[in-house]
Amino acid sequence: MVFVRSLVLLLKFLFLYSLFSFTFTTCFPQIHPKCHGDESHALLQFKEGFVINNLAHGSPKIASWNSSTDCCSWDGIKCHERTDHVIHVDLRSSQIYGTMDANSSLFRLVHLRVLDLSDNDFNYSQIPSKIGELSQLKFLNLSRSLFSGEIPPQVSQLSKLLSLDLGFMATENLLQLKLSILKSIIQNSTKLEILFLSFVTISSTLPNTLTNLTSLKKLSLYNSELYGEFPVGVLHLPNLKILDLGYNPNLNGSLPEFQSSSLTNLLLDKTGFYGTLPVSIRNLSSLIILSVPHCHFSGYIPSSIGNLTQLTEIYLRDNKFRGDPSTSLANLNKLSVLAVGLNEFNIETIPLSFANLTQLHYLDATDCNIKGQIPSWIMNHSNLACLNLRSNFLHGKLELDTFLKLRKLVFLDLSFNKLSLYSGKSSSNMTDSRIQILQLDSCNLVEIPTYIRYLDDLESLMLSNNNITSLPNWLWKKASLKNLDVSQNSLTGEISPSICNLKSLMSLVIP
Ligand SMILES: *[C@@H]1O[C@H](CO)[C@@H](O)[C@H](O)[C@H]1NC(C)=O
Ligand SMILES: *[C@@H]1O[C@H](CO)[C@@H](O)[C@H](O)[C@H]1NC(C)=O
Ligand SMILES: *[C@@H]1O[C@H](CO)[C@@H](O)[C@H](O)[C@H]1NC(C)=O
Ligand SMILES: *[C@@H]1O[C@H](CO)[C@@H](O)[C@H](O)[C@H]1NC(C)=O
Ligand SMILES: *[C@@H]1O[C@H](CO)[C@@H](O)[C@H](O)[C@H]1NC(C)=O
Ligand SMILES: *[C@@H]1O[C@H](CO)[C@@H](O)[C@H](O)[C@H]1NC(C)=O
Ligand SMILES: *[C@@H]1O[C@H](CO)[C@@H](O)[C@H](O)[C@H]1NC(C)=O
Ligand SMILES: *[C@@H]1O[C@H](CO)[C@@H](O)[C@H](O)[C@H]1NC(C)=O
Ligand SMILES: *[C@@H]1O[C@H](CO)[C@@H](O)[C@H](O)[C@H]1NC(C)=O
Ligand SMILES: *[C@@H]1O[C@H](CO)[C@@H](O)[C@H](O)[C@H]1NC(C)=O
Ligand SMILES: *[C@@H]1O[C@H](CO)[C@@H](O)[C@H](O)[C@H]1NC(C)=O
Ligand SMILES: *[C@@H]1O[C@H](CO)[C@@H](O)[C@H](O)[C@H]1NC(C)=O
């Protein structure tokens, strides 16, 4: 009896309760905003400190923030689903302009895990030291946000960071990072997966402890004024995919024997790296971009590079590499960029196997001691936008308008070979060509090829050291022309006054 009565009571209670909560939630859906009042207040106070620059890139996320709505629903804000604390502030590209207060209310949001203020204009403010209070941060992005000065030591208190991006390209580096602070970051933020400090002046050697960051996936120290020997152990980090040390001319180092590796981008442009590419480079089986131009590398390109079938871009320009790399490279049929110019190569001919590299859009082989003829199948490489074969020993007669087939070509340099170029039978319906820069110095030309007449985008025309005797009148109608060099030819007579029609002309050499 007692049992039945209490059951009835319980059912009554449940009924009333569900009725109540039903009415409650339907009639007053937002009576309890999720957002904590102090956090909402802190965000609004932050908003008050800035103006919106409508001319800047992005959209003004903070403009719509106001106290009559739940801050968890504001543009760029996310709250924790259980505690309702603000954990995520994403104000990337939000047209924010103004100085960041050292005491900004933003740093009262101590539960933040994500803070992205990138691509705004903080008017050269210092990064406030209070950033250290955001101890839960996992993701911090202040890239392209016009902060300047010393990075405060408190950044190293952010021991949960997975991603730190302070990189920013300006005319000069705006941020500086002391070595001692970098060391503390490395010591404390041991979980870092992404560390971008490009264009941050570090101006020191790198500590060996960098190799302790075993979770590191992406590291960029581009243009950080580094010097000394690079801690080569970093190249053995098991998760590292992207390594960019570019533009640190005093940072030297050499490539180690590679074991299996996740590296996709190895970028060492204009560094002091020296030595050879090791045979074990074949172990970098995920490599997509190998970029080592303007370094001090030497020796032969190991044929094992041909095993790296994922490679799409290879930059070796301006080193001291030797030999003939062409057979090893010919297997890499995903290649779109091949820049091997200015080395000590010695290439007998452009091998037939290159006919398979149909994705090529950029081929730079200046000063490669290439002999033989320009193969006709090169005209089938319809993706070519840049073809630079300057200063080789290529010979043979060539009709210039065969290059008309390369509809994407914007840059062509055949200068200083042993070629004999002819005009060809080009006609006015071939105006699809997009060539902007045409360099044909020392190509045994006896006249300006008529082909040139139909190049509507032509900006630069270099024809020095030929045997051209006269300049055609149509040349003075090429309004797009900015640079013209017809020096060292057999020109006689006077230059037509129509030359004044070339309104865009910036440089002219006609001695
Ligand atoms: C507050 O924001 C909401 C949504 O963006 C908007 O509809 C409302 O007009 C705003 N109120 C005030 C006072 O700005
Ligand atoms: C930006 O900085 C300059 C120089 O410090 C200052 O004069 C100007 O008021 C600042 N602008 C804003 C919006 O804070
Ligand atoms: C920072 O803010 C706190 C509380 O908002 C205040 O007590 C303190 O004086 C401020 N400090 C500075 C340097 O503005
Ligand atoms: C940081 O922000 C910039 C600009 O908004 C973006 O390009 C970059 O990828 C971001 N960095 C990371 C690590 O997400
Ligand atoms: C390392 O992180 C802890 C916890 O955030 C902090 O107390 C300590 O000061 C940090 N050490 C340095 C050198 O920043
Ligand atoms: C970090 O690296 C240093 C030197 O390379 C080493 O002595 C130290 O034990 C490492 N710390 C950790 C936590 O692995
Ligand atoms: C490496 O760099 C240091 C300092 O920049 C320099 O003294 C040294 O000669 C360099 N070593 C090599 C092999 O380039
Ligand atoms: C790395 O390369 C070397 C030399 O080419 C080779 O002996 C070794 O087995 C390779 N290691 C792995 C893990 O592939
Ligand atoms: C790597 O290259 C060697 C020699 O060219 C070849 O024998 C081997 O099969 C290649 N391995 C892979 C995985 O492509
Ligand atoms: C082009 O590639 C195909 C298939 O990979 C191969 O059979 C052929 O021999 C290659 N041609 C040249 C000229 O290397
Ligand atoms: C260009 O014109 C010639 C004759 O004037 C014609 O035979 C040829 O098919 C035309 N080419 C194109 C691409 O239209
Ligand atoms: C230039 O052409 C003239 C005749 O047109 C010829 O006599 C002369 O040898 C040629 N010069 C060169 C360098 O080819």
Image: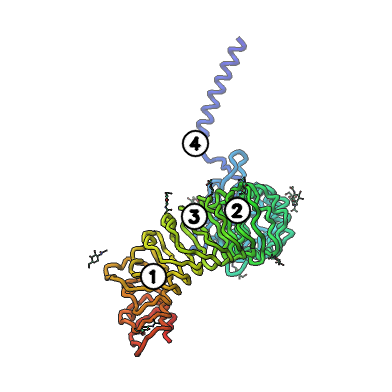
The residue tagged 2 is 279
Instruction: Give the residue type that dot 3 points to.
Output: Thr
Give left or right: position of 95 versus 188. Answer: left
Cα–Cα span, label 4 and label 3? 61 Å
SS state under label 2: helix
| Front position among marks 1 and 3 | 1
Q: Name the amino acid, label 4.
A: Cys
**Does 3 appear above or below 393?**
above
Mark 4 vs 3, N-terminal side? 4
Q: Is there CB contact under 8 Å for labels 4 and 2?
A: no
Q: CA distance from mark 4 to mark 2?
A: 73 Å
Check disc 1 and report the residue beneath it: 396
Is the Cβ of the residue at disc 4 closer than 8 Å to that at disc 3?
no
Of residues 229 and 159, the one drawn nearer to the viewer in this rendering: 229
Residue 312 is marked as: 3
Whether the residues at callouts 2 and 3 have beta carbons within 8 Å, the answer is: no
Question: For the point 42% across and 54% down, which residue is it?
Answer: 356
Q: Is residue 293 left or right of residue 430?
A: right
Where residue 314 appears, as percent x and y from the top left, is: 52, 58
Q: Quadrant of residue 301?
A: bottom right
**Mark before the other along the chain sequence, 1 or 4:** 4
Q: Which mark is residue 27?
A: 4
- Local packing at callout 1 (Cα closer than 10 Å; few below 14, some 14-19, many 20+) is few
Name the front one of labels 1 and 4.
1
4 vs 3, front mark: 3
Residue 313 picture location, percent across and down: 50, 57
Distance from disc 1 to disc 3, alpha carbons, whole Å, reads 31 Å
Task: Give the secondary structure at mark 3.
Answer: loop
